[in-house]
Structure formats: structure tokens, C-alpha cells
Image (spheres, rainbow, N blue to C red):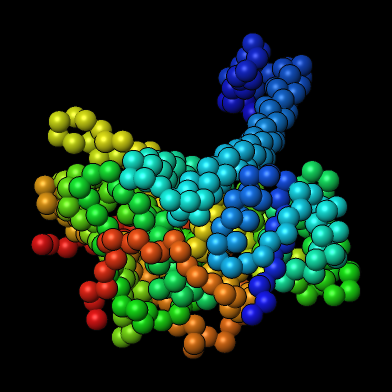
């Protein structure tokens, strides 16, 4: 008590206790009261943070609802027109509706990335385990990109028709692939984005490659691209569009599934992102149909959810 | 083969119409309800084979509808799939616990929803029309 200096920082009261132990009773009482006030303010601060968390969660929930509802209607009608369920389209109309779908898909991915990041930050993100027919999942995804891309880029899909049914989290896999495809498309002006998938029976792993013929990533940026809000800053100083959440989610969700992401890129020629994670084949699993792997509480523990160990091993750079 | 009948419950008319067109194109018959009250009434009158159920309804919510249906003879076993804009991180577990067969968050993927419906109903007269014009489709591996 003697050498302590009590400052109630948000008020004008500043109490310095004397250095000597000659402090009077009044001074001691004042110091004690001051300490209690500080403690109380700490408690108020903590309570305020908790209230803020609740407000933030409710706000995000409301925002999610308010954005998703109209987006759902736009995408529903655009899809119906595109699939000619309301009649034939002339080529210009087809092109126009393709634009609507493309832009709405991008918007939808941006919004959903923001919400997914919120669930990770709040410790709510979890990976489920349910039966997934990988071929079905890929063909659903393929049909979501079945519109003209508006530049000389096409998407090739390359996977065997006999991929096994597995136990994993379809929604997480979908977010991973959508973001890798979106990333590939954004950085490729001309050429091909190829999505391939394989099941490696020796290691019981499902692996996806998303390969592009785009601008590539300079070696020194290879690690940074997976960081939250990090965007590739090109040598010219121009920062390419995007929120910087896509690859962050790719890495976080892959870790949540117990796997790793690796990237292999040649600047100016293109990049290959490989996502690999262990899966149980559905036909060998007798577990409950709806297991949940709920590991992360913070971002730190998300990292520890990886079977591959510390962060610096997550990014496996390979040479060309 | 008799067409399978799907009850769509949503307070947004555009969602109802969009799903009706989409499901109709796949050979399903549809009946619509715009609130919880009508969801129960139409389910009783029409005995659908499956229900697509929104969670936020003006006169209640999807959970309430699920509970009521469970208490009505002959309706308790109708498979229900939730289609809602509410975050699945918060509501999905409760919905599945309440007996729903699946949870789709808006904006949902058409093909994924159709696949889930197809799985629950084990094969209606389905003629996929949306996959006919794929130009970049390749199966080069294997």
C-alpha cells in the first residue's frame, strides 16, 4: 500500500499515497476507497465487454438475416431465369443474367466470409461429421459456377466419378473450395482455373487442388496470404480487390478439419493451392450420424486443432 | 408414378414462388403456406410428403410448427428441412434436435437443397434441367 500510486484514470481523482509510512488514517481510507473504485471499474469494464459481445452477436445475427433474405430471393430468381424455367432467353439476356449470377455469387461469398470470420472469432465455429458424397458436392459446386465468367477464363473440373462417400463437414469444404476458386478467378485474366479432387487410400486423405494460370504469388508473400485481412500488395503498389478473408478462412477451416493447405506458386505463371485432410470413409464408420468436432475457442486453439503441429508447418512450400 | 408433394412454408412470397418454380421443374407438386397457422392447416389438409420450413414466421416460428406437427396423427413422420436466413451456427443443432432432417441457410444452393429433398423422398420423377449446358465439364482423371 505504501509505495502504490492509485489513479482513477477516467475521473479527475488522482490519489498519490505518501512514500513514508506516516500516512494518516484518512489517507489510508482514501487509498482503500480508491482501490475499491478501481476494482469496481474493472468489473464494469469486463461486464461492458460481455454486453458488447452479446450486442455484437445479435447484430451479426440480425445482419446475417437481413442480408441473406434478399440475397436469397435475387439468387433464386436469377437461377430460375438462367435455367430457363420461365422460358427461353436470347443470347444477350443469357449474358446479362450470367452477370447477375456471377456478381451475386461474389457478393454472397463476401458476406458469408464476414459472418464465418465472426463465428471463428467468437469461438462458435465447429466442424461437423456427417456423410458426404464428394462427387455430389463437387457437381453442386460446379453447377453454381455454370455461367459465363466474362473474361477468357474457364473452370475445369477434374475428379474421378468414384470418389468415396466420406465423413466430414460439407459446409466447410464448400467454403474452402469457393474461396480457392474465387481467388483463382480473381487473379487469372486469361487461362484456366482447374479444380481437382482425389482420395488417397494409403493415407485416408481427401485432397483438393485448385490450380490457376494467373499472376502468381511472389515467394516472399506466400506465407502472408493466409493472414486475416492480408491482401497481396503487388510491386507496383496496387492492392488487388478483396477483403483478405478468403484464404484466411481456407486455412482456418482446413485446420478445423484436421488438415493442411499448401501453396506452390511461380510469379507470373500461376499457383496451385492444395488442401489435404484426413477423412473416414462413410462405409467404414459406425459412429453417430451427427458428430461434432468443436475445438476452437480462440484463434490460437484453432491452430492447435491441426494435426500437423505448429503454424509454420502449415504452409508447405514446395519447389517447382 | 404419383408426384411427391412438398409443402413450402415461408413468410416471403418471393421465396415461395421461387421454390415452387424450381421444385415444379423437377417434377414435384407444391403447396404453400405463408405463416405458422397456415403451415399446420395446409399440412393437415394436403398431407405433404415433405416440408420446407422457414424459422422466422410472423405468427410464431418454425420450431413451434415442428412441435405442433409432432402432436398431430399422421403428420409427425413427415420429413422437415429447415430453410432459413438465421445463422446455422446458432440454430442448426436445435433444429436437428427438434427433428428436422436438414438445415439450409439462405441463400441456399439449389442443387444441394434438391439433392437433400431427393434423398429424403428417395427418388421422385426428377429431370435435371439446370445441368444441360455445362461447357467446361471434364473428367480427365481416371
Left-right relation of A189 to A15: left
- The residue that appears at 83% across and 46% down in the rendered structure is B59
Q: Position of residue B81 (x, y in %)?
A: 67, 64
- The residue that appears at 34% across and 79% down in the rendered structure is A161
Residue B26 seen anywhere in this rendered image of the structure:
yes
- The residue that appears at 40% across and 47% down in the rendered structure is A89
Residue A280 seen anywhere in this rendered image of the structure:
no
Q: Position of residue A39 (x, y in %)?
A: 69, 31
* Residue A315 higher or lower than A25, as above or below: below
* Res. A258 image quadrant: bottom left
The one of A192 and A97 positioned closer to us in this rendering = A97
The one of A20 and A251 positioned closer to us in this rendering = A251
Left-right relation of A117 to A236: right
Q: Quadrant of the N terminus of chain A?
A: top right
The one of B131 and B105 positioned closer to us in this rendering = B131
Left-right relation of A58 to A259: right
- The residue that appears at 67% across and 72% down in the rendered structure is B4
Q: Position of residue B134 (x, y in %)?
A: 33, 62
* Residue A313 higher or lower than B12, as above or below: below
Q: Quadrant of the C terminus of chain A?
A: bottom left
**Number of numbered discs on residues:** 0
Furthest residue toward top: A12
Q: Position of residue B112 (x, y in %)?
A: 51, 64
Amino acid at each position: 500500500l505504501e509505495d502504490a500510486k492509485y489513479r482513477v484514470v477516467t475521473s479527475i481523482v488522482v490519489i498519490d499515497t505518501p512514500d513514508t509510512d506516516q500516512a494518516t488514517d484518512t489517507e489510508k481510507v482514501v487509498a482503500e476507497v480508491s482501490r475499491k473504485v478501481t476494482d469496481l471499474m474493472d468489473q464494469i469494464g469486463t461486464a461492458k465487454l460481455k454486453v458488447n459481445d452479446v450486442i455484437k452477436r445479435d447484430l451479426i445475427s440480425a445482419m446475417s438475416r437481413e442480408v441473406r433474405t434478399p440475397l436469397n430471393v435475387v439468387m433464386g430468381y436469377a437461377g430460375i431465369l438462367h435455367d430457363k424455367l420461365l422460358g427461353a432467353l436470347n443470347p444477350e439476356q443469357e449474358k446479362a443474367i450470367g452477370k447477375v449470377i456471377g456478381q451475386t455469387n461474389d457478393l454472397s461469398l463476401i458476406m458469408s466470409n464476414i459472418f464465418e470470420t465472426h463465428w471463428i472469432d467468437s469461438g462458435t465455429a465447429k466442424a461437423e461429421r456427417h456423410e458426404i458424397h464428394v462427387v455430389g458436392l463437387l457437381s453442386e459446386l460446379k453447377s453454381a459456377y455454370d455461367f459465363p465468367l466474362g473474361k477468357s477464363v474457364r473452370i475445369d473440373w477434374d475428379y474421378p466419378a468414384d470418389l468415396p462417400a466420406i465423413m466430414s463437414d460439407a459446409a466447410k469444404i464448400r467454403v474452402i473450395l469457393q474461396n480457392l476458386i474465387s481467388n483463382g478467378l480473381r487473379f487469372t485474366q486469361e487461362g484456366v482455373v482447374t479444380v481437382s479432387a482425389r482420395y488417397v487410400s494409403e493415407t485416408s486423405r481427401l485432397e483438393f487442388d485448385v490450380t490457376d494460370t494467373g499472376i502468381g504469388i511472389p515467394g516472399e508473400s506466400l506465407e502472408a496470404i493466409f493472414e486475416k485481412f492480408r491482401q497481396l500488395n503487388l510491386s507496383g503498389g496496387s492492392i488487388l480487390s478483396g477483403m483478405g478473408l478468403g484464404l484466411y478462412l481456407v486455412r482456418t477451416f482446413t485446420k478445423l478439419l484436421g488438415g493442411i493447405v499448401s501453396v506452390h506458386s511461380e510469379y507470373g505463371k500461376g499457383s496451385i493451392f492444395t488442401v489435404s485432410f484426413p477423412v473416414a470413409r462413410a462405409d467404414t464408420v459406425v459412429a453417430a450420424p451427427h458428430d461434432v468436432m468443436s475445438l476452437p475457442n480462440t484463434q490460437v486453439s484453432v491452430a492447435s486443432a491441426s494435426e500437423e503441429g505448429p503454424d509454420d508447418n502449415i504452409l508447405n512450400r514446395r519447389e517447382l | 408414378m404419383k408426384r411427391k408433394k412438398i409443402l413450402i412454408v415461408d413468410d416471403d412470397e418471393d421465396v415461395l414462388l421461387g421454390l415452387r418454380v424450381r421444385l415444379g421443374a423437377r417434377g414435384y407438386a407444391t403447396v404453400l403456406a405463408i405463416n405458422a397457422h397456415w403451415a399446420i392447416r395446409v399440412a393437415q389438409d394436403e398431407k405433404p410428403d415433405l416440408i420446407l420450413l422457414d424459422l422466422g414466421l410472423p405468427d410464431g416460428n418454425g420450431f413451434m410448427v415442428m412441435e405442433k406437427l409432432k402432436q398431430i396423427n399422421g403428420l409427425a413422420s413427415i420429413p422437415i428441412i429447415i430453410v432459413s436466413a438465421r445463422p446455422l451456427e446458432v440454430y442448426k443443432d436445435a433444429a436437428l434436435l427438434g427433428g428436422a432432417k436438414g438445415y439450409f441457410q439462405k441463400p441456399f444452393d439449389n442443387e444441394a437443397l434438391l439433392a437433400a429433398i431427393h434423398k429424403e423422398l428417395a427418388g421422385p420423377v426428377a429431370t435435371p434441367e439446370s445441368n444441360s449446358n455445362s461447357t467446361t465439364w471434364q473428367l480427365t482423371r481416371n
